[in-house]
Amino acid sequence: MNEKPTGINVHKKTKEFNVTWSDGHESIYPFELLRAACPCASCRGGHENMKSEPDADVYEKKLGDNPSTRIANVVAVGSYALTIVWEDGHDYGIFNWHYLRALCPCEEDRKKDSKQG
């Protein structure tokens, strides 16, 4: 996967984070999913649990609407990733483009991932 975002929009009212990719695909991420899939060492349970793909269980986690699942800001990390700043102050996760695309919750991408995994 070498796709890169061509557009990123944060919709605080609907709590959705939208990414349009260079291949034309649009990913719509609920804020709750992004926080459940935070790729930082603290959220993943230590450096030994970090990998380039999100864990399958992140799609089932229900965190609810609270400061930890509300986006305060999004900050670019070079030209390869972004960091989400959450209202609770958490800002350690670096979502690189590969990880973010692999996290896409759409049915098409979930089927691709299940065939690869």
Image (cartoon, grey):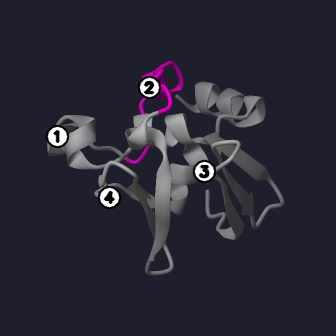
Q: Residues within 10 Å of mark 4 (few under 14, many from 20)?
A: some
Say which residue appears at 66% left-offset and 63% top-offset. 3
- Mark before the other along the chain sequence, 3 or 1: 1
Counting other residues with Cα less than 10 Å from the Cα at mark 3, is it few (<14), some (14-19), or many (20 or more)? Answer: many
Which dot, 2 or 1, sits closer to the camera?
Answer: 2
Range of residues picked out in magenta: 52-65
Q: Horizontal and vertical percent for residue 89?
A: 30, 55
Q: Nearer the viewer, mark 4 or mark 3?
A: 4
Q: Amino acid at mark 3?
A: Arg
Q: Which residue is mark 2?
A: 63
Alpha carbon separation for disc pair 4 and 3: 19 Å
Determine which residue is flagged by label 4: 91
Residues at circles 3 and 1 in contact by the CB criterion of under 8 Å: no
Q: Between residues 45 and 49, which one lies in front from this camera angle?
A: 45
In the image shown, does 59 or 1 lie closer to the viewer?
Answer: 59
Compute the Cα span from label 2 to label 1: 24 Å
Q: Quadrant of residue 105?
A: top right
Q: Earlier in the sequence, mark 2 or mark 1?
A: 1
- Looking at the rendered image, the disc whose residue lies closer to the viewer, 3 or 2, is 2
Residue 43 location, x and y as percent?
26, 39
